[in-house]
Amino acid sequence: MASQKAKADPTAGTPFESVIGLEVHVQLKTRTKMFCACENRFGAEPNSLTCPVCLGQPGSLPVVNRTAIEYAVRVGLACGCEIALSTKFDRKNYYYPDLPKNYQISQYDLPIAKKGRVEIQVGETKRSVGLTRIHLEEDAGKNIHVEGRPESWVDLNRAGVPLLEIVSEPDLRTPEEAGAYLRMLRLTLLYLGVSDCNMEEGSLRCDSNVSIRPRGSTQLETRTEIKNLNSFTNVENALSHEIRRQVKLREKGGQVAQETLLYDPDQGETRVMRGKEEAHDYRYFPEPDLAPLRFDAAWIERMRASLPELPMARLARFQEILGLTRYQADVLARDVELSRFFEECVEMHRKPQDLANWMLNLVQEEMNSRGIGVRELGIGPERLVSLVKAVEEGKVSRQNARDVFKAMVGKEETVEEILRSLGLGQISDDSALRQTVLDVIEAHPSAVEDVIRGKKNTVNFLMGQVMRRTRGQANPSVISKLIEEVVADLRSS
Amino acid sequence: MSGGDLALDVLEIRNAIRSRKVRASEAVDAALAQIRKVDLVLHAATEVFQEEASARAAEIDRVLDRGEDPGPLAGVPFTVKDNICTRWGRTSAASRILETYVAPYDATVVERLEKAGAVCVAKTNMDEFGMGSSTENSGLLGPTRNPWKVTHVPGGSSGGAAALASATRGMFHLGSDTGGSIRQPASYCGVTGLKPSYGRVSRYGLLAFASSLDQIGVLEATARGCAMALEVMAGWDRRDSTSVQAPVPAYLESIEKVVRGLRVGVPREYFPEGIDPEVKGLVQAGIDVFRKLHVSVEEVSLPHTPYANPTYVLISAAEASSNLARYDGVHYGYRAADPSDILDLYSRSRVEGFGPEVKRRIMVGTFVLSTGYYDAFYNKACKVRKLIRQDFERAFQDVDAIVCPTSPVAAFPVGEKIDDPLKLYAVDVLTVPANLASVPGISFPCGLSGEGLPVGLQIYGRPMEDEVVLRLAHAFQQETDYHLRAPPVRAWGEE
């Protein structure tokens, strides 16, 4: 939904178009892991969040986390999927040291949700991207290789964390669309509150499948898969790079080989991880340790009814009901906390457009310059509203409101207290300003002459002088009224 | 305790402790002494918990002395098959790959039994990971010997448990049964062995061989001894999603109910061509005992019986290939020395750690799950399994239980079949259907062959009707004394 700088379509000027499908893995923010009672938390001491089950100790058995099931169903419903009334888990067999059982409990032929869509907008174009399936599985641990050491280490804190795999149809045509899809998907998950979607911590990961074909063709051609994409920008860059590589190859009469590639963001290059012949046979079969799951249709309907407002709906409401511009709506809706903050403000002060301006000009700017979220600013909606009201009531100038706002960050004082301590309260009182105006007029006789002769611009000069002497606290409309009165007096005398 | 007291069955021991006629320490020390004595010949125990068990028994005596109740099985000794996790000692499934493995937790059954006051005295030998029918495939110990004839196998895979159940008294033995691994050795050693309904007993802490078939059960001289243990072991466990949420009957009480009027079926497919005529004769005589008890006996048909064994071989191997993947030398257990890379570490640890039968089944299982073979083998086996289940459902519409031989043959000499897996698999033919159909099964002695080897009679019941098979076996044992006969190798009486 972000109106980004348009990126060059890497197939522009070639007879090809690209076909992109994304596989997104999202860690669910449940309290405990997928199949055991261990805490699901990032950043703990290695192997401290483990038990016989997630360590794959002999004799241990998995037990399904109901909350994870619920989260998966919510995501499926939010993306307009069909929810399976009966589903099951399967074992995906492969050997890797971060997978203690050497099989992953996943879902094979009966995913929990299928056939959904994600609506995206790139520039003015809206598109609907199909979702093939959403399934639940367990995350693996993490292998740790220490430079210069012969041995490797394994941290199994992440092993068994609930993971949602969301597979899109090959509906995306440009890297930019891929980026827009990812951003919208992430936002939807954040709105649902089911994941942190933090790519740096690995709670959202993305693999891209990409092929090219002659424009107008509807066939799917040999694709490559790019792994290890740890930011949206990397996804877009890796795709652009890979599409250009495939185009060059095809233009030279070459064939694209089915390969799995690793993207190196530092070099901006991909390298081959494995070819088709090394593809795994995962020997999927139904997980005999877990009974099949059956859902009650009424339960699914209750889940559907309890879904929160989703990004597209909020975007539309902000524009149509609250009267924000698309840009304002976009900036606010793309940040869950920011839009919640904004709505709380609107709740207290029914001036959404004004508030949106303040949100974008003051709040967002301050967040960006500090690189933090709105909650971390430590300014509640109440205090922002009282600042906005102070401006409206002429207690502080628009200009000084910025300094007041900055002074509020991380402190607990009220707007009034800050105005007092900074001496930034706006002076709108005639009697308080009249003497300053008279002083200025006395000090600048030639300027006054000019004003009397009708030089309008010079009024601004006089106003500036008054502002200087009041350290910006004077209410400009009051000064201008006073100057005009004095000048009128002089003229008539 | 005198030598005569050693012949008490486990229920009598339990009652003697509760009525303070026997101290827990005496019962446990007697159990330990018996095991030590017979094990010189039988090689049935992989580990004996002399000190730990004595200490535990002394603790229970102190509780009893204070007039408190340490639980329904206070001071009752029991042994645990080596594939069931205990914090005490090693849990190796008789495999080199877990030779030094110590489980960080107790299996649910062990936890429940200990909470009820029972005392674990030893772990017992088995075929590696439960794969075998003779206990010749132990990777840690030589083959366990049959107390009735030490040149012969005790059956398997719970051969250690069955041999001890036969040669000792006053304790019960945990086994596991994936295709007959409790019932067949019970039959060969002349004791009672119960494989409960699938889901009746938690599998949490049982080293999985084939998850959809595995079930923990119990071996003892008598059906009532099994009933006593099952009453404590059974019940839903939140750690095992396949355990059944159904109330646990008071088995000890309900097995005393009369069997008159019950209807049992004898499946015509269970007397195949290869059956030993002596076995057939003893089983038929055993069935006559039920007639005498006014149980109506009729012929039934389980038409898919001939497919049960191949179905079992495929499904169990497929699940095993995945279940045993975790034994890779990375996280625990045996690790090959000086691996050159991760692949070398995996493959050499497994090549050196697993025995030949385990490797054979892993390879079969890997093959039948592979792309291109899945439908022809694994998937087809699952379909046949459904047909076998339906056979039972139909039969159980007409009868309350099914009576049949446990094994087509009696115990065979050590070494006779070990080099011919198909011959060895064939002895499971009458026991695997119970696992495929999730029904309870019990084996108990119904006589001795001319060679002096016990023969077992088997009863199958409806799923979750473990009480019915126990009741029929108990009624049989009230009427006969085969279960009381002592093998030549025994820890009590004359030798």
Image (cartoon, rainbow, N blue to C red):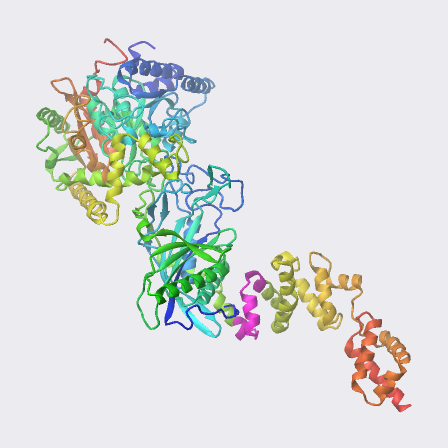
Instruction: Using the image, determine if residue A70 lies above or below residue B40.
Output: below
Q: Quadrant of residue A399?
A: bottom right
Q: Identify the main secondary structure in magenta.
A: helix
Hey, which residue is sitting farthest front in the picture?
A: A252
Instruction: Using the image, determine if residue A474 lies above or below residue A297.
Output: below
Between residue B46 and residue A143, name the one nearer to us: A143
Q: Is residue A184 left or right of residue B378?
A: right
Between residue A52 and residue A385, name the one nearer to us: A52
Q: Going 40% across and 62% down the picture, which residue do you hit?
A: A245
- Provide residue A414's location: percent of width, then percent of height: 73, 61
Query: Is residue A307 visible in the rendered structure shown here?
Result: no
* Region rendered in magenta: A317-340
* Quarter the C terminus of chain A occupies: bottom right
Between residue A143 and residue B261, name the one nearer to us: A143
Query: Is residue B81 visible in the rendered structure shown here?
Result: yes
**Magenta-colored stretch includes residue A337:** yes
- Provide residue B484's location: percent of width, then percent of height: 22, 18
Q: Is residue B126 left or right of residue A29?
A: left
